[in-house]
Image (cartoon, coloured by chain):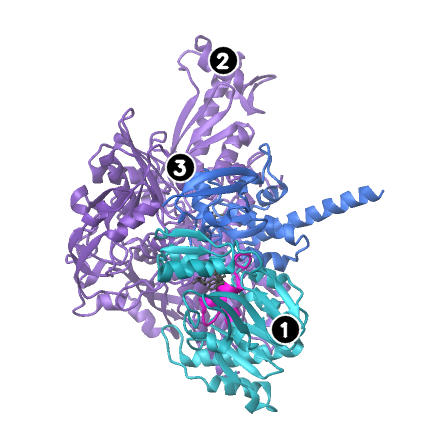
Chain colours: A purple, B cyan, C blue
């Protein structure tokens, strides 16, 4: 067992205990969706659009039916499914709703859009079938960039969305902001374009669906972060009741947001299973995952910031355009990125005046979904570039400039109407800088024979968005709360449900630790039940670092309720005072007597006549939790050291330090894992990965040869330092830890690259950083 | 990403393989390590109707030294070369670390690389640099083709459809040669690769044209490495391509030739 | 077209009648039910499908099952015995070298094959080998550490055995 580094709240929380998930995953005995095989199972693949933008004239599947092994093939007309439509409660000039058909009907809007589904005896035959389909298109001029979408006279992706604009919202405009800029000592501007990225869970999307006559249910096993949302949309699309659909989630090979929206393919495969009354499996292949799955992060920022002579930030004025691709995703809509950026941009700084316009434009590219961090990696990068530029303009050290502007008094209510709970903004920056200094990086930076730069990123991250916070975004479907049901069984073991859904985050372990402490049982006596719409009342799944803050709090609250029941029964059985009862060592102590849980359970289930009056049989409790107000903010400072190679433009990360504060860490090793993995994804966005398209809208990165996921040679070791500012309103003092790594890395890396280029006069503000641009910047000085 | 259907044939000897190729005609393809071909088949970018598996042929793998000559059998894996102690041919072993990653090198073969003829593939560069001869066998027997004449264009060679690569023959040691390259990500095919041999003053470049490009360095004898590298870079005809300009590619050539020279000099 | 193929996997012989186009990874997973080996790209880059072919780590997505008749295939299922994880698997757990666990079987087989051939690698060499496979969750550091630790423990155990034999 790994030595716990610190403990809190009892024996378990705060200890890096062995993960409950590990043994099966290490033995190759996990059960991922593609591991499921049902008797008579068929395999689906999709005929996909080869055009970026076209009218769909005809889909001829005659030849498909003739292919050996093919069992069925359906077009949109054959399946006749309702569309998927995500809505915001906003007026027409702010939001244009668009429908996403499960299979394209009259028009295709991106290369890879599903046009027909082929079902065959094995995946090989399914692909043979797909090849035999004949689709007739009348090509239309494609819209392949945000600027192209907004251009005068641009072709329309959706006829109902003029100027290809799905969302156009100005959340904030401080009165008098123009005067602030006019009178400011210094104004800096950052223009940034960030590359389109793929969240890229290593396991692609997939589903196994079958109709069960006995349960009268369409059973859907799918790797989704949001099973209840899948149930609702699927039921609606195929015309079943909610109770006629059961969605369960097996082990999941990552999600990172790509799997927290409802996809079209799983609906189509399930519809085929319903029609055929046979199990149907669909496993997305990597080419489709790279070209036709949900993407993210392609954004353009024009941001100006006003500063006083002594470096006080006076105002922030931002224009954000997000290229959301062809459709709005369910349930978040195309507003997900621009609204996140607009709401949160002032971040950790005391910004007195703020104006923002956020737009979502639609283009002929694969649609987008939330991706780990949602817009925060981008706007944090932009704001941190603002500070670096301002520091240069003002002749103030960039770290010092940040210090002068960080929020230090909490709670702090910002210009963006958000109240920030206490964090360690200044402390994390100080420690990060000190760490790099003590390791000698600042002296190496001044070595004239090397091109070394150091970059920082300060940020906080709202975690545990409650219903209130999502309602502010005016989503029509408002996530936020979580419900947990807990039960103790005969021998004193506990099972507890959570509406969140672990797909790598270790909830089977960490949630069990929470329960273990609340009830005084070892954590391996606690079973976590997740990802099953029949067993879980309702849940929003896992995204936005909500699981431990909200789900973990619901689990804790349910545990307390169960504990109260146990105390009441035990006090009665021991003829003691329930108020004096305490949970201890897997039982209840009342005065000098102690009764093990197993004996209490024995009474609750098998000898109900012994229960106190008014106490019903069984040991179960339900609790829910929602974060009131604005949620809780984790924070961190990242520091990155890069060396540039003037001969090639190569960028190497020499050192990476992360000082993070997510309140009480339930399992420090897991928190570190989340940070490291997140940082790797942030580095990927800053330096490597981009989904590009040519002028005709054809994807240019259909394989891992072109979509360059970094390997162990590119991702550095990360030194992590912990600070701890416990959250006052989650049950364990925990704040979210899922996304921070991803959020800080692009800013730290880009600032480091620019710091290394400081002698060249060149500044690079777009990501991923092009090596040719680095090469050209350094060439002059070589 | 499942391959189209094909018929599988297992060759037990070189002549058997040639016989199969002759009999099955244009629709047949050899499979060796499969590290290029199977990936293309999974994408259905290649769809041979017949696959002739040569991996079960005895005697096609192995490295033999005969005097100054080094003979490497077509089925020798990249990994076997990497692990071999090749003395004054050590440049070959050292270069292998640039070929993909370990699990690729355990299966990918020398013959397959040469036949596949990717213009940045390390084996293609090394063969041209060291003026290797490629021994092939066809229905009318064996013939040798010089590396420089072997590569005709991207993924195009002088090999006839019914011929098989048997062996790569390196005619003379290269104790002072080196290969180096650049890609944004380790293990990728190079953006630009440079190989040099100090003893012959040959420079071979990958990523600058349809086939490995030979720049003869004799005319610069006596000048500095830097000048030679610059001259090599300037001698190339390059075009801007999406995502990479001719200027940047030329710059990479200059850098990599310089670095290859330095590495070769270190030995 | 159906082909008879005889495969030896984890020491067990299997007789299969399959289409020759079936890749080794599909045969392992779907014909033999050994679903521990995963599929992440089917073009040789992610490494989720890495198995040992005659002891050497190889991409099971780039091999047709029909090609490896006569070879000994080893998959992740062979590592633990009687429900006990082996030392490498335990090191992965202790160092938190897995999160979602999807890349893990491939990483384990890559490391098993490599350490068998190279018992005394440097950390940098391990890193370069780990770079053969993709992991989207961990950032790789803990995977490198786990393999490093396992190699060190194996060396220590070997030394221990030698010492004991000597004394
Ligand atoms: C992830 C990845 C990364 C890679 N990175 C690199 C790299 O950096 N550098 C590099 O050079 N390569 C790289 N490769 C390719 C690898 O080196 C292949 O091994 C090589 O290109 C082909 O060898 P093979 O034995 O696998 O051939 P196969 O894939 O079996 O065949 C390739 C072609 O050669 C033909 N062929 C094979 N053997 C013969 C023969 N004896 N006679 C005639 N024709 C024959 C086949 O018909 C086919 O057309 C990479 C591959 C992968 C999957
Ligand atoms: S599935 Fe084989 S390498 Fe990715
Ligand atoms: S642990 Fe999820 S991909 Fe490696």
Q: Does mark 2's beta carbon lie closer than 8 Å to ligand 3?
A: no
**Closer mark to the observer between disc 2 and disc 3:** 3
Can you say whether A470 is above or below A274 in the image?
Answer: below
Q: Mark 1 lies on which chain?
A: B
Label 2, on which residue?
A572
Q: How far apart are marks 1 and 3 (CA)?
A: 55 Å
SS type, badge 1: strand
Q: Are marks 2 and 1 on the same chain?
A: no
Q: Inspect the magenta stretch and tell me whether residue B115 lies in it.
A: yes
Asked if residue A90 lies left or right of residue A457, the reply is left
A103 or B8, nearer to the observer: B8
Circle 2 residues within 10 Å: few <14, some 14–19, many ≥20: some
B231 or A352, nearer to the observer: B231
The reply to whether residue A214 is visible in this rendering is: yes
Q: How far apart are marks 2 and 1 (CA)?
A: 94 Å
Tag 1 and tag 3, C-beta contact below 8 Å:
no
Which residues, given as a range, are shown in magenta?
A: B104-124
- Residue visible at 57% across and 71% down? B169
A317 or B199, nearer to the observer: B199
Circle 3 residues within 10 Å: few <14, some 14–19, many ≥20: some
- Residue A36 - label: 3
Asked if residue A389 lies left or right of residue A128, the reply is right
Q: Are marks 2 and 3 on the same chain?
A: yes
User: Where residue C114 sits in the image (x, y, percent)?
Assistant: 61, 52
**Closer mark to the observer between disc 2 and disc 1:** 1
Image quarter of the N terminus of chain C: top left
């Amino acid at each position: 067992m790994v030595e716990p580094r610190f403990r809190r709240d009892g024996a378990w929380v705060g200890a890096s205990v062995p993960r409950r998930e590990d043994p099966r995953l290490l033995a190759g005995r996990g059960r991922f969706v593609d591991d499921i095989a049902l008797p008579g199972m068929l395999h689906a693949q999709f005929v996909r659009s080869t055009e970026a933008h076209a009218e769909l004239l005809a889909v001829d599947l005659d030849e498909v039916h003739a292919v050996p092994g093919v069992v069925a093939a359906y077009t949109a007309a054959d399946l006749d499914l309702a569309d998927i439509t995500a809505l915001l409660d906003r007026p027409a000039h702010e939001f244009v709703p668009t429908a996403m058909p499960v299979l394209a009907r009259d028009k295709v809007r991106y290369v890879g859009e599903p046009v027909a589904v082929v079902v065959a005896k094995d995946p090989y035959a399914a692909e043979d079938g797909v090849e035999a389909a004949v689709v007739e298109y009348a090509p239309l001029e494609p819209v392949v960039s945000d600027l192209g979408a907004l251009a005068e006279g641009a072709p329309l992706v959706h006829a109902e969305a003029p100027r290809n604009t799905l969302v156009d919202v100005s959340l904030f405009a401080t009165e008098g902001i123009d005067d602030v800029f006019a009178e400011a000592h210094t104004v800096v501007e950052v223009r940034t374009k960030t590359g389109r990225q793929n969240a890229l869970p290593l396991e692609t999307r997939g589903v196994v669906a079958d109709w069960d006559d006995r349960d009268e249910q369409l059973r859907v096993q799918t790797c989704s972060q949001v099973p209840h949302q899948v149930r609702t949309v699927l039921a609606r699309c195929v015309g079943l009741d909610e109770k006629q659909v059961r969605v369960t989630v097996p082990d999941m090979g990552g999600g990172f947001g790509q799997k927290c929206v409802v996809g079209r393919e799983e609906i189509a495969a399930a519809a085929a299973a319903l029609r055929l009354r046979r199990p149907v499996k669909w496993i997305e292949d990597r080419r489709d995952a790279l070209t036709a799955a949900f993407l993210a992060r392609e954004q353009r920022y024009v941001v100006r910031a006003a500063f006083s002579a002594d470096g006080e930030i006076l105002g922030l004025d931002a224009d954000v355009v997000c290229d959301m691709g062809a459709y709005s995703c369910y349930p978040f809509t195309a507003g997900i990125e621009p609204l996140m950026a607009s709401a949160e941009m002032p971040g950790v700084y005391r910004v007195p005046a703020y104006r923002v316009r956020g737009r979502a434009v639609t283009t002929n590219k694969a649609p987008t979904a939330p991706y780990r961090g949602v817009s925060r990696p981008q706007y944090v990068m932009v704001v941190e570039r603002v500070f670096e530029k301002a520091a240069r303009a003002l002749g103030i050290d960039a770290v010092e400039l940040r210090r002068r502007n960080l929020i230090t008094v909490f709670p702090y209510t910002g210009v963006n109407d958000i109240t920030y709970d206490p964090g360690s903004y200044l402390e994390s920056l100080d420690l990060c800088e000190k760490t790099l200094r003590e390791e000698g990086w600042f002296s190496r930076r001044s070595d004239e024979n090397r091109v070394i730069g150091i970059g920082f990123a300060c940020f906080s991250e709202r975690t545990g968005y409650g219903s209130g916070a999502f309602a502010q975004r005016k989503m029509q479907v408002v996530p936020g709360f979580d419900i947990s049901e807990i039960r103790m069984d005969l021998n004193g073991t506990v099972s507890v449900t959570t509406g969140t859904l672990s797909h790598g985050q270790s909830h089977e372990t960490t949630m069990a630790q929470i329960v273990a402490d609340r009830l005084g049982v070892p954590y391996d006596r606690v079973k976590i039940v997740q990802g099953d719409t029949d067993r879980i009342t309702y849940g929003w799944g896992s995204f936005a670092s909500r699981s431990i803050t909200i789900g973990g709090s619901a689990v804790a609250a349910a545990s307390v309720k169960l504990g109260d029941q146990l105390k009441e029964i035990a006090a009665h059985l021991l003829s003691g005072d329930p108020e004096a009862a305490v949970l201890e060592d897997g039982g209840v102590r009342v005065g000098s007597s102690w009764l093990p849980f197993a004996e209490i359970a024995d009474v609750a289930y098998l000898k109900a006549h012994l229960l106190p009056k008014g106490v019903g049989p069984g040991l179960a409790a339900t609790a829910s939790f929602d974060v009131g107000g604005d949620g809780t903010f984790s924070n961190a400072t990242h520091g990155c050291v890069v060396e540039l190679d003037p001969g090639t433009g190569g960028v190497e990360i020499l050192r990476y330090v992360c000082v993070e504060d997510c309140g009480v860490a339930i399992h420090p090793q897991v928190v570190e894992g989340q940070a490291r993995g997140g940082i790797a994804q942030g580095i990927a966005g800053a330096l490597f990965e981009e989904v590009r398209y040519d002028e005709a809208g054809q994807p240019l990165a259909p394989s891992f040869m072109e979509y360059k996921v970094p390997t162990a040679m590119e991702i550095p070791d990360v030194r992590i330092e912990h600070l701890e500012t416990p959250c006052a309103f989650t049950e364990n003092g925990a704040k979210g830890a899922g996304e921070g790594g991803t959020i800080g890395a692009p800013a730290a890396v880009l600032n480091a690259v620019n710091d290394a280029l400081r002698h060249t006069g060149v500044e690079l503000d777009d990501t991923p950083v092009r090596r040719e641009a680095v090469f050209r910047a350094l060439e002059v000085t070589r | 990403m499942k391959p189209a259907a094909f018929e599988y044939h297992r060759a037990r000897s070189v002549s058997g393989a040639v016989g199969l190729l002759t009999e099955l005609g244009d629709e047949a393809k050899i499979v060796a390590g499969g590290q290029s071909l199977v990936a293309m088949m999974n994408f259905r970018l290649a769809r041979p109707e017949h696959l002739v598996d040569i991996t079960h042929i005895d005697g096609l793998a192995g490295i033999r030294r005969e005097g100054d000559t080094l003979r490497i059998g077509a089925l020798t894996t990249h990994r076997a070369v990497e692990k071999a102690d090749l003395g004054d041919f050590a440049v070959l072993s050292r270069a292998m670390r640039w070929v993909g990653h370990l699990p690729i090198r355990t299966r990918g073969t020398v013959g397959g690389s040469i036949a596949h003829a990717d213009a940045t593939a390390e084996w293609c560069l090394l063969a041209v640099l060291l003026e290797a001869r490629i021994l092939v066998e066809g229905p009318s027997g064996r013939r040798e083709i010089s590396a420089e004449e072997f590569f005709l264009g991207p993924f195009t060679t002088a090999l006839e459809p019914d011929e098989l690569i048997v062996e790569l023959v390196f005619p003379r040691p290269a104790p002072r040669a080196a290969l180096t390259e650049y890609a944004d990500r380790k293990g990728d095919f190079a953006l630009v690769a440079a190989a040099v041999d100090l003893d012959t003053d040959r420079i071979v470049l990958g990523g600058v044209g349809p086939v490995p490009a030979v720049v003869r360095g004799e005319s610069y004898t006596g000048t500095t490495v830097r000048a030679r590298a610059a001259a090599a870079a300037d001698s190339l005809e390059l075009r801007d391509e999406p995502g990479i300009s001719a200027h940047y590619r030329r710059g990479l050539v200059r850098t990599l030739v310089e670095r290859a020279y330095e590495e070769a000099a270190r030995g | 077209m159906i082909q008879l193929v005889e495969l030896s996997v984890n020491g067990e012989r299997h007789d299969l009648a399959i289409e020759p186009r079936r890749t080794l990874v599909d045969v392992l997973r779907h014909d033999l039910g050994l679903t521990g080996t995963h599929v992440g790209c089917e073009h040789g880059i992610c490494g989720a499908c890495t198995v040992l072919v005659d002891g050497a780590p190889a991409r099971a997505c780039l091999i047709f099952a029909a090609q490896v008749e006569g070879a000994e295939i080893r998959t992740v299922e062979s590592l633990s015995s009687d429900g006990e994880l082996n030392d490498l698997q335990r090191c992965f757990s202790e160092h938190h070298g897995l999160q979602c666990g999807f890349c893990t079987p491939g990483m384990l087989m890559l490391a098993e094959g490599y350490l068998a051939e190279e018992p005394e690698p440097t950390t940098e060499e391990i890193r370069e080998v780990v770079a053969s496979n993709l992991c989207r969750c961990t950032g790789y550091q803990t995977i490198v550490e786990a393999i490093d630790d396992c190699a060190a423990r194996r060396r220590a155990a070997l030394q221990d055995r030698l010492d004991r034999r000597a004394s």
